[in-house]
Amino acid sequence: MADFNLLPSDLAPKTSFIKLSSKLKKIAVVGYIIFLVLVVTLFSIVFIMSKQVQEQNEKEETLLTSIKALKETEQRLILTQDRLSHARSVLDKENATNELFALKKYAQDLPDNVSLNESAVSVDGFSARLSLGSSDDLTNLLSKMYSSQIFSEIVMTSFSYSSESNYGLSFRLRI
């Protein structure tokens, strides 16, 4: 069909305005397309960046957990190293093995009502803390210690008495 223009020809826009109008429409469409492309690109970049941030946070969590585990392992290693050095210092002493055997023999030869509560081996000898039921047990223990000839030096470091736990003694002993 043919286009009919019912407007008077003197009211029709000039051809330069029609060309300008069509160019402006094309520019507006191109600008709108560019705007949409930029918005989609911007949202894509934001989405990708948020994923990367999330991955970095997960890596950071993993690293922090690893660091914590390594710190705990380091503490255990330091404690083990300290214990080993202490054990070496005790075992490096000439009499250390003899003192260990003497402590074992001493613990086995205790009277019935005497209990060995604590013992510790050190470079100077070893120490023992004992509980006794009665004064007779105290007498028997002391006479047995002096007559056994196991120890070259016996030093009583503490003596206590209470009605509930009876007698308590601490000794430092050397072979």
Image (cartoon, rainbow, N blue to C red):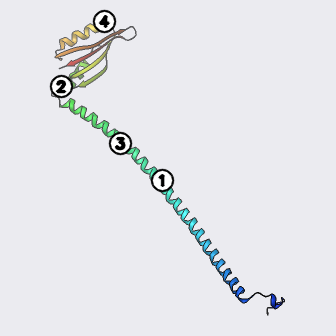
| Residue at figure coordinates x 25%, y 32% from the top left | 86
**Mark before the other along the chain sequence, 1 or 4:** 1
Vertical comparison of 82 with 158: above or below: below
Q: Quadrant of residue 10?
A: bottom right
Q: Which residue lies under the disc numbered 1? A: 58
Where residue 39 appears, as percent x and y from the top left, is: 60, 68
Marks 2 and 4, how far apart in space?
30 Å
Marks 1 and 4, how far apart in space?
69 Å
Where residue 14 appears, as percent x and y from the top left, is: 74, 88
Give the amino acid at mark 4. Ser
Query: In screen coordinates, is 51 left or right of 8?
Result: left
Query: What secondary structure is marked by label 1?
Result: helix
Give the amino acid at mark 3. Thr
Give the amino acid at mark 1. Glu
Where residue 60 appears, as percent x and y from the top left, is: 45, 52
Query: In screen coordinates, is 70 left or right of 102?
Result: right
Where residue 82 appears, as percent x and y from the top left, is: 28, 35
**Mark before the other along the chain sequence, 3 or 1:** 1
Q: Nearer the viewer, mark 3 or mark 1?
A: 1
Q: Which residue lies under the disc numbered 3? A: 73
Give the amino acid at mark 2. Asn
**Quick check: marks 3 and 2 in contact, CB under 8 Å?**
no
Q: Nearer the viewer, mark 2 or mark 1?
A: 1
Q: Which residue lies under the disc numbered 2? A: 98
Q: Nearer the viewer, mark 4 or mark 3?
A: 3
Q: Quadrant of residue 104?
A: top left
**Mark before the other along the chain sequence, 2 or 1:** 1
Marks 3 and 1, how far apart in space?
23 Å
